[in-house]
Image (cartoon, grey):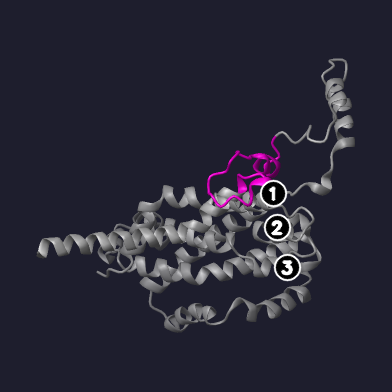
């Protein structure tokens, strides 16, 4: 009787977990399904498209779009060997409709640059800052450490207007380079507190005796960080980088205000919003852009999942 009850309990728990997972993944499955359907198939309740549609992905990735609006007679003309490459490009330029093109790759590069730069800078500064919090003793250390986390007590919407006014008075928002630098600083401020907190907890788990032995052998403080702390903290460093990258990658509020006057600098979250409100708001294109936006984070997360779990769990143990 006890064994039967345990089996029923395990089965019920398994079904509950499966139900929660399906509930969490259903929006993503619906998003992928809609991106692969033609317009006449959008009313189909099934997640499996009647006919596979890859045109939205090809359009966003600019695959095979050179001859999209070109008539057949012109295509045959372009096949003639007498025409030079410059003449062919000039002919194709007459039929290219740039008003219907969503610059996904450009927005993707902008987001990748901002997110990677913010994550790397946050990781670099947090490494030395967390080492200072966990290993050295100086006046005001506790106050500074608590003050870093004090930033999270205020929502982004409360800091938006003051930060915008600061950068306007500094003259940074008058140029595209200054605007990009201002947004990078804001992303750094957003990601640095959690980076310092996570790395500080992890550094405290590293035995001080190892570092002390390196100092006795003549290693400098910087050399100790480079040769001892960093190699032993690879899981935590990966964890911090991914967290900082995801925060910057998904940020929308500050990008929507700071980049409003510079369309060439749009990030993917803000670019998707502009696509939704444009004349090109076609569901398969919107869903395909959403899938491609989520695509970089998923393989990175799966590739370093073991290191990520190790970094999260090891920070809770002290020497």
Instruction: Give the answer, above or below, for where 286 lies relative to 50.
Output: below
Label at residue 104: 1
Can you see residue 129? no
Q: Is residue 223 left or right of residue 3?
A: right
Mark 3 closeness class: few <14, some 14–19, many ≥20 residues within 10 Å: many
Residue placed furthest toward the left: 1
Cα distance between the residues tagged 1 and 2: 8 Å
Counting residues from the N terminus, which is met first, the one under dot 3 or under dot 1? 1
What residue appears at the point 32 percent right and 69 percent down from the top-left corner? 204
Q: Which residue is mark 2?
A: 271
Are dots 1 and 2 in contact, CB under 8 Å? yes
Label at residue 258: 3
Q: Check disc 1 and report its element: helix, strand or loop.
A: helix
Cα distance between the residues tagged 3 and 1: 19 Å
Q: Quadrant of residue 4?
A: bottom left
Can you see residue 37? yes
Closer mark to the observer between disc 3 and disc 2: 2
């Amino acid at each position: 009787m006890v064994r039967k009850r345990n089996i029923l309990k395990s089965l019920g728990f398994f079904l509950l977990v499966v139900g929660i997972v399906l509930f969490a993944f259903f929006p993503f499955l619906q998003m992928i399904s809609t991106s692969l359907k033609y317009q006449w198939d959008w009313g189909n309740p099934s997640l499996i498209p009647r006919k596979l549609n890859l045109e939205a992905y090809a359009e966003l990735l600019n695959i095979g779009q050179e001859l999209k609006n070109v008539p057949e007679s012109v295509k045959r003309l372009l096949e003639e060997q007498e025409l030079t490459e410059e003449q062919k490009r000039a002919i194709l330029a007459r039929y290219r409709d740039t008003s219907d093109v969503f610059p996904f790759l450009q927005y993707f590069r902008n987001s990748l640059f901002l997110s990677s730069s913010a994550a790397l800078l946050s990781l670099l500064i947090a490494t030395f800052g967390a080492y200072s919090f966990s290993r050295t003793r100086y006046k005001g250390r506790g106050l500074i450490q608590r003050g870093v986390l004090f930033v999270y007590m205020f929502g982004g919407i409360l800091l938006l207007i003051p930060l915008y006014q600061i950068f306007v008075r500094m003259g940074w928002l008058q140029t595209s380079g200054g605007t990009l630098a201002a947004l990078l600083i804001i992303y750094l401020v957003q990601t640095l507190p959690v980076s310092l907190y996570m790395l500080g907890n992890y550094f405290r788990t590293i035995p001080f005796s190892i570092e002390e032995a390196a100092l006795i052998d003549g290693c400098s403080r910087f050399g100790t960080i480079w040769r001892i702390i960093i190699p032993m903290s690879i899981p935590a460093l990966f964890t911090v980088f991914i967290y900082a990258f995801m925060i910057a990658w998904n940020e929308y509020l500050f990008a929507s205000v700071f980049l409003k006057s510079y369309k060439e600098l749009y990030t993917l979250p803000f670019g998707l919003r502009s696509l939704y409100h444009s004349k090109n708001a076609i569901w398969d294109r919107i869903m395909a852009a959403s899938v491609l936006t989520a695509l970089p984070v998923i393989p990175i997360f799966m590739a370093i999942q073991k290191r990520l779990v190790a970094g999260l769990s090891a920070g809770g143990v002290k020497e």
